[in-house]
Image (cartoon, grey):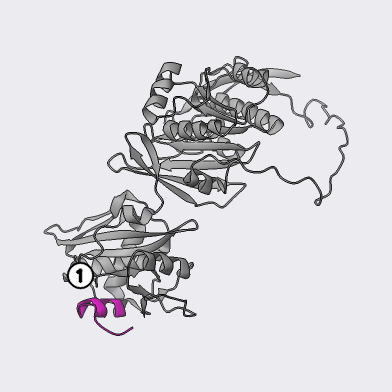
Amino acid sequence: MARNRTSFICQACGAVHPRWVGRCDACGEWNTLVEDTSATAQPLSGAKGKRLPKGRAQALQPLSGGGESPPRLSTGLAELDRVAGGGLVPGSVILIGGDPGIGKSTLLLQALAAMAENGRRCVYVSGEEALDQIRLRAQRLGVAQAPVQLLAETNVADIIATLSDEGAPDVVVIDSIQTLWSDVIESAPGTVTQLRAGTEALIRFAKKSGTVMLLVGHVTKEGQIAGPRVVEHMVDTVLYFEGDRGHQYRILRAVKNRFGPTDEIGVFEMAESGLIEVRNPSLLFLGDSGERAAGSAVFAGMEGARPLLVEVQALAAPTPLGTPRRAVVGWDAARLAMILAVLETHAGARFAGHDVYLNVAGGLKIREPGADLAAAAALVSSLSGQPLPAGMVIFGEIALSGVIRPVGHVEQRLREAAKLGFAEVLTAPLPRRPKTEGLNIREIGHVTDLVAMIATGGGGGS
């Protein structure tokens, strides 16, 4: 038998507290506990003589066997299909998070319109906008004639009943999960309890009917999807739609995918007519590759399975302050501090009297350690005033000892550099010589070699 119990749930991490406190013990956030009254089941055993009820035996299934998996659904957007692992898997639940106004609703409306025109039954459920607002967006995107069905509702039970009325649709968009509520739960929409219950009900419906469920989620000021992380654990795929409003590009990044690779990205460009797929994203993050400027280096990186060339910019400016400033945009600040320490200790590059600024062009965020060598080259180039050779791409990891280590996916990086017209590559000693077409590969093993190369104007043999 169930009984009512009052508890306090943290809206940041989902931790449950027996009483209200100002600071959550689990995540350290202040004033995030909200009172929640719900029915709590009695313990199954160990209390007042209660025993675990006898269960019903289920049939075990072999690992082998089973029918062929159903084909994936193409969204009509190649970049979205790439991030999803080749298309949408029937019965899967996908959570898409991003800052307000970044383009989540625009992306999903374009995808629904493309799938609806290919004969799929698609439903767009809005809990934030009126139907006329969605129609106005569709007119601006040029997809107003697509046979997409609309619904403005926030009650979970009503949504599931509507979707089941005429047969389950192929694809459903819920915009957004923070607006869902159920009358059986005495909590406000957006609370942890409502989020968990609403998401669980939609997942059960998707698994039972084979409908692809696309859930839109808002993010917090830290960039995480609002609500407890348990929601991310419940869904099959978690995508983040990233970008800076000051730049026209948007990046769709997969951080969890049960049906495909993670850390895959799709690149879009925001235009007046909606989101446009970018087939060659390297051109977005590169300046004029023929221009020799001190403090600029081109990094050949990898985003998922896609090679990407990015311009890394550095500036070392003399400062009268006792504590020089270190500012970085698009890279890890702790990694910048490590590279500066290695250059000062092992290569004699003195940054103690300089403010150091490091920026990744286009607002892209680099996460892989292979950018160490490119960042170090840009820093030394700015400090010495010597530009790097024109048409050179750089990649490699720097150890604390100053040794430069090779990174993976070398051939993909080289092919991307050759495709965009670069002629020279600076990297760590490679265990085997990859096949190159017109690329001069220069291998260096220590940061002292990097400083010597830049000090001599980038000369030397390969």
Q: Residue at x 17, y 62 (%)?
A: 354
> Residue 162 in the image: x percent, y percent?
62, 17
> Residue 369 in the image: x percent, y percent?
41, 63
Which contiguous range is marked in magenta? 449-462
> Residue 396 in the image: x percent, y percent?
39, 70
Image: 333 above or below 191? below
Q: Is residue 461 magenta?
A: yes
Q: Residue at x 49, y 80 (%)?
A: 432
Amino acid type assigned to the residue bearing label 1 in the image: Pro
The answer to which of 443 and 423 lies nearer the viewer is 423
The answer to which of 109 and 369 lies nearer the viewer is 109
Image: 125 above or below 115? above
In the displayed orientation, state which residue is furthest to the bottom: 461
Which quadrant of the figure contains the N terminus? top right
Residue 326 appears in which quarter of the rendering?
bottom left
Q: Residue at x 39, y 38 (%)?
A: 275
